[in-house]
Image (cartoon, helix red, strand yellow):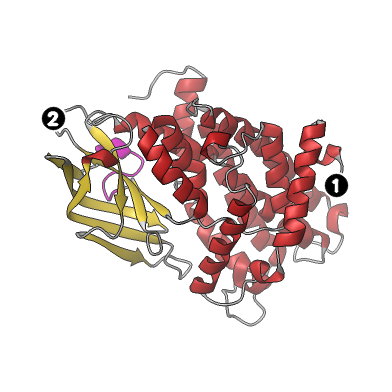
Amino acid sequence: MNDRDYGVALTDADRAFRDEVREFLASSLTPDLLSRDGGETARLDRLRRWQGLLYDAGLAAISWPTEYGGRAATPTQQLIFNTEMAAARAPEPINRSAINQLGPTIIQWGTDEQRAYYLPRILSAEDVWCQGFSEPEAGSDLASLKTRAVIDGDELVITGQKIWTSKATYANRIYLLARTDPDAPKREGISYILADLNTPGIEVRPIRQITGASEFCEVFLDSVRVPLANVLGPLHGGWRVAKSTLGYERVGQSRTHRIERRLGILVKMAQEPNALTDSGFDDSYVADRIVRYAAQVEALRQIAAQATAAGVRGVAPGPEASVAKLLTSEVDQSMANFGVELAGAPGVLERGSPGAAKRGNVAASYLLMRAATFGAGTSEIQRNVIAERLLGLPRDN
């Protein structure tokens, strides 16, 4: 791979970093880590082992500052890292959302004690985190949340329900929002709380999805006691902290890693005889779709790299995060749709069905990506943010 493949000019330091990443992948990304054999337990074991290798090599969170275990990587180096990981089809670390979302939030808002305790455990995957934001009546309008946390001495007593919580079946910690001042306006009086998922009073119930998997859960909290010291950021000021997390989530580097892998799969499917054509890229329709996706993925890589670099320097993501999230989710969903077009009838066969395209992964991706345009904030919400905060259009009352 030469410099032009990244779309940017590389410095000597960039080339040295590129070579380091390639050497790491060549020595560490073994066939067993790339395997898809076994069930959920085997998959999680692979993700945990992969994060351990990244951690040992100092590559688990390259965008974090060096004092917190990162590499203070430049946007170009983040671009290199994600490009190389995607090209090698490397798995994601088991704690990717905590690395990309919670970690930068703790760096930005946490106390010295919170940073010293939580950040190393995120990097090593000693702690695996899930997010407890959405509720049955507080999804896109997150500030309407009803989970309450009552101050009782040096503890908070939390009661409520969270929903659509991914990773809760195997995480051991949760970061959540709860209303600590019920008399304050709805975007005030909310606190951002870090909790042990094994605390008495917490119950996790998996939700069966259209794919047949249970990646999301309901989390019930019944008089759960958490130390007051576990509040991240100001007490009653958690809405501002949550906006930081949501910004990191919407612009996270992990999204480009996944979407680049999906683009690579589509390119291979398009080059082979498929349901649309036997002519590969000589077919103008297929070529046009692939080129459009390639351009959109490159735009996302640049947005994500720059936003993440700014975030770990203490600059909260702005409305550009909504541009990244909107583009990512709609391109991701469109790619999944196009995969079914290319695969034809075998593309709608589920895993385990004879003749299923890509062992059923084409159908699974199609079903899973139905959620892309409302997870982490619906496309409608993102368009409102872009209209009001970037374009200066009047608020829709």
- Label 2: state its secondary structure: loop
- Residue at horizontal 45 percent and vertical 71 percent from the top: 212
Q: Label 2, on which residue?
A: 183
Q: Position of residue 5 (x, y in %)?
A: 82, 41
234 shown above or below 59: above
Q: Label 1, on which residue?
A: 1
Question: Is mark 1 in CB contact (under 8 Å) with mark 2?
Answer: no
Start and end of the magenta stretch?
135-144
Within 10 angstroms of label 2, few (less than 14), some, or many (20 or more) residues? few
Residue 140 among magenta residues: yes
Q: Position of residue 65 (x, y in %)?
A: 56, 34
Q: Nearer the viewer, residue 256 or 363?
A: 256
Q: Residue furthest bottom?
A: 354
Within 10 angstroms of label 1, few (less than 14), some, or many (20 or more) residues? few
For the C terminus, which image quadrant? top left
Q: Nearer the viewer, residue 86 or 271?
A: 86
- Residue at horizontal 59 percent and vertical 48 percent from the top: 60
* Snapshot quadrant of residue 107: top left
Q: Main secondary structure of the magenta part?
A: loop
Residue type for callout 2: Asp
Q: Residue furthest left?
A: 152
- Residue at horizontal 29 percent and vertical 43 percent from the top: 138
- Label 1: state its secondary structure: loop
Disc 1 from disc 2: Cα separation: 59 Å
Question: What number is the disc on residue 282?
Answer: none
231 shown above or below 332: above
Residue 235 among magenta residues: no
Q: Position of residue 356 (x, y in %)?
A: 64, 75
Residue type for callout 1: Met
Q: Is residue 373 visible?
A: no
